[in-house]
Image: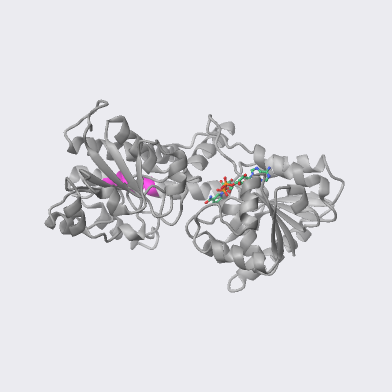
Amino acid sequence: MQIAVIGTGYVGLVVGCALADFGNEVTCADLDAERIAGLRAGQIPFFEPGLGSLLHDNLRAGRLRFTADPAQAAAGAEVIFIAVGTPGRADGSADTSQVLAAAQSVAPVLSGPTVLAIKSTVPVGTTERVREAVAAITNQPFAVVANPEFLKEGNAVEDFLRPMRVIVGVGPGAGRGMDDERVRNLMRRVYAPMLRTSDRLLFMDARSAELTKYACNAYLATRVSFINDVAALCERMGADVEQVRRGMGMDVRIGPHFLFPGIGFGGSCLPKDLRALQVTARQFGLELPIVAAAAAVNARQPRSFLARILGHFGANGGPSALRGRRIAVWGLAFKPETDDLREAPSLSIIQGLLDHGAQVAASDPAALPAARRCLDTRVELHADAYEAAQRADALVLCTEWRQYRQPDFLRLRRIMAGHVLFDGRNQWDPAQVRELGFCYYGIGRP
Ligand SMILES: NC(=O)c1ccc[n+]([C@@H]2O[C@H](COP(=O)([O-])OP(=O)(O)OC[C@H]3O[C@@H](n4cnc5c(N)ncnc54)[C@H](O)[C@@H]3O)[C@@H](O)[C@H]2O)c1
């Protein structure tokens, strides 16, 4: 099939490379000309496991092309995926202007029946608005469908190639000059190669598809905040949340996923989607108290962790509370296997440390380039995690990268000035590190 993908971010680039890998002719477009030049030369603009080889293989095979002109990408395409950003506005609502602009930029070149599939996470009603905007520009037959993406950064290629489900919101009356069944058949063809072992393609109306994406993210966020609330209770009661979550997770009605206590969730999706969902609900005259509570608990997590650090050093506030203290931070990305720093809890913890006068030395296996662009220049960045820990009074674990899970604690004891561990992801064994002479703080552990 001839396919266009508009937007080459974490979602668009994975979609483009993966669809090319199935033999499709794919052209990806992005307004960022520098990014396009890099992609043509085989450079991925961010860290995502497995994406590099997909890009190289398909560039070499000539099935994958890149352009800075969306209209050029769209010309002749049967399906055009829109995977541009939907950042939050100041009031929390999702800004869908990039989606609208992307659709308007491809509409003039439509020739013959074409489906525009919105991969971006968009509020209910956006697919209909995009359809109206496209209809105002072209006389060609077309349809607009909601096709939310559920991939996870860090495992994005695998998630896209082997999806738990694919949701396509078609209609009612998805387009003009194309009936809904024809649209569904075209989308079935796109996804057929990745759904051979089980048919997990779910068609629904566009509004339900748009809402499904927000409902999933809100539910996942709620689980994380729920276990963080339980962890706070464990701390008060002398219980161990690690035992509690295991006991909960073995119940098949609950399951073990997304029940990990820590310094909170971040990233480019959960926080912004929670805010956008609340704004949408309010527009329809409804408050969502559970979603609001999930967001509030999440905002509390980095704050209370910072308070614990201050408390340890006997410093309960003030700009010089940590003056003269050197704090090492392991992990900056909002989760392992990505370099994405958007709304990462590490950022607010580091800012808090700096605000209280600490000297901060940080390390991350993938996010250092991104950190150089956005972190306060006072933060020392080290490629080597142990170098960051050198002479530190305390070590703070913010992201549970694999390489941090079983560090050389004896070496840490030798090189650190103080022997305090703040484990923001409950990765380390409290008994083991205490035996080695560390003072250990986790989340919700006695
Ligand atoms: N990142 C994720 O893990 C993830 C997962 C599921 C869904 N989503 C959703 O998918 C969408 C994209 O997310 P992302 O993380 O890939 O975003 P991103 O910010 O990484 O990438 C968006 C890209 O779109 C480009 N762009 C913007 N306007 C354009 C236009 N008019 N024409 C061409 N290119 C344009 C930008 O230059 C940028 O490169 C968002 O709505 C997000 O909520 C993201």
**Figure coloring:** one colour
Most extreme residue toward the top is 318
x then y, percent, for residue 259: 36, 54
| Viewer-side residue, 422 vs 304 | 422
Determine the image quadrant of residue 304: top left
On the question of residue 161 being in view, the answer is yes
Determine the image quadrant of residue 400: bottom left
Query: How many marks do you count on the picture?
Result: 0
x then y, percent, for residue 367: 43, 50
In the image, residue 324 sits, relative to residue 103, either above or below, namely above
x then y, percent, for residue 52: 55, 62
In the image, residue 98 sits, relative to residue 193, either above or below, namely above
Q: What secondary structure is the magenta-colored segment mainly? A: helix
| Viewer-side residue, 57 vs 207 | 57
Q: Is residue 191 left or right of residue 337?
A: right
On the question of residue 423 being in view, the answer is no
At x 28%, y 59%, the residue is 247
Q: Is residue 395 left or right of residue 124?
A: left
- Which residues lie in the magenta part? 224-231
At x 28%, y 40%, the residue is 305
Most extreme residue toward the right is 139
At x 40%, y 46%, the residue is 265
| Viewer-side residue, 323 vs 25 | 323
| Viewer-side residue, 238 vs 86 | 86
At x 26%, y 52%, the residue is 241
Q: Is residue 200 left or right of residue 171?
A: left
Determine the image quadrant of residue 1: bottom right
In the image, residue 258 sits, relative to residue 86, either above or below, namely below
x then y, percent, for residue 203: 66, 58
Most extreme residue toward the bottom is 197
350 within the magenta span: no
